[in-house]
Image (spheres, rainbow, N blue to C red):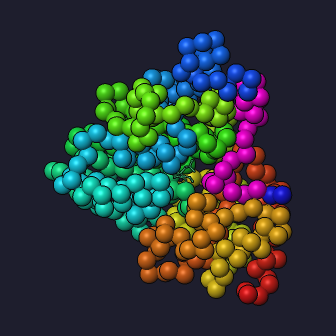
Amino acid sequence: MIYLDHHAATPICEPALLAMNAGSSAAWANPSSAHTAGRGARALLERARAQIADAIGAQAADVVLTSGGSEACNLGVLGVQGLAGGQHVVTTEIEHPAVAQALRRLETDAGIAVSRLAVPAGAPPSAEQLAAALRPETRLCALQWINHETGAILPVADYGQVCRAAGVVFFVDATQAAGKLPIDVATLGADLVALASHKLGGPAGAGALWVRRGLQLSPVITGGSQERGRRAGSPDVLHAVGFGAACAQLRERLAAQPRLQSLRAHTAAELQRLGGVLNGDLGNTIATVVNASFAGRRGDELVAALDLEGVCVASGAACSSGLSEPSPVLLAMYPSERWRASSALRLSFGPETTETEVESALEALARVLSRRAA
Ligand SMILES: Cc1ncc(COP(=O)(O)O)c(C=O)c1O
């Protein structure tokens, strides 16, 4: 099997597997229990929290552990204290549903106005455009760092300066950025940063929200006072252990980026040779992904045909796979070329991806494309 779907989930890295194996005899206990078993689990949990914090230049006390990226995004958007009817939020048109749907809930349930900035052909809004979208009643700006489908990189540090100057809370969905770009919350200018374990070599089922010290956050999951009252529920210690261990080797993941850059350039050129039209601007996308549309073909059918050839790729976000719906990201990026959204293929790479695998995948794609569309 050739796996080129690292934006959906990364294979679990060996340090994470080893740490989970080693921790499994202690991680089952409830870390809130005062006895020896509970304290053992607590030690594992706190070590994981410290590793996650370390990877983004943060203090462990400011990291809220969650069940994944979606929960971290929901908490970062819905948990901002004081968000109320009549206020205003700024976002983009290309957010992951974890952010987009949370914002829709604010709009429909709480009477909060939401402005969605356009990202035409993958060109992100400039800091000036963001500043122009702010209103006196703007309370929150919530957007992603790297787009999950096309890899578009948004200038979040510039946005951070705008938000700080305006006193607007700034949430960054860094789910696709962690492990691909260095993250330092001290210089990012964000107030809230969401991460997910299974995008950076850890197991699915773990995520985190970094919260700027002093920012008041209301829990979305209510109940006990775990996670300093910001996320109720007994935590999944074992998955946090894997997440922490994966975070401890993020430097190695980052070191793979230059190689992936040339691998991606080659792949993009080959996809174009095969008749694909690239989605997004390669000059401003992360090296781990290339997205191309094939006119007259359906993305979901190409994905299925490639799977039969032993190649795992995607046509859109994993969370909407199986729905056969055109990609909302590509619809927003290319409103006058709707065909792109239902004809897209996304190939995404990780440090494990080899040149040989990519060559074989491209050969398989050439075979698939040479067959007539159904
Ligand atoms: C940009 C982005 N945000 C949020 C998420 C949600 O993360 P999770 O799958 O861990 O819930 C994803 C997952 O694909 C993502 O790509």
Q: Is residue 85 above or below residue 121?
A: above
**Residue occupying image coordinates x 43% and y 77%:** 335
Residue 189 visible within the image: no
**Residue 265, image x, y percentages:** 66, 60
**Residue occupying image coordinates x 62% and y 29%:** 237
**Residue occupying image coordinates x 47% and y 73%:** 331
Q: Is residue 139 above or below residue 90?
A: above
Image quarter for residue 304? bottom right
Q: Considering depth in this image, is 219 or 315 the residue closer to the camera?
A: 219
Tell me, yes or no, whether the highlighted magenta stretch contains residue 18: yes
Residue most toward the top?
36
Residue 167 visible within the image: yes
Tell me, yes or no, whether the highlighted magenta stretch contains residue 207: no
**Residue 164, image x, y percentages:** 27, 39
Image quarter for residue 311? bottom right
**Residue 69, image x, y percentages:** 53, 46
Report the magenta residues as a range: 3-23
Q: Considering depth in this image, is 51 or 180 the residue closer to the camera?
A: 51
Is 169 left or right of 335, judged from the image as shown?
left
Q: Quadrant of the C terminus?
A: bottom right
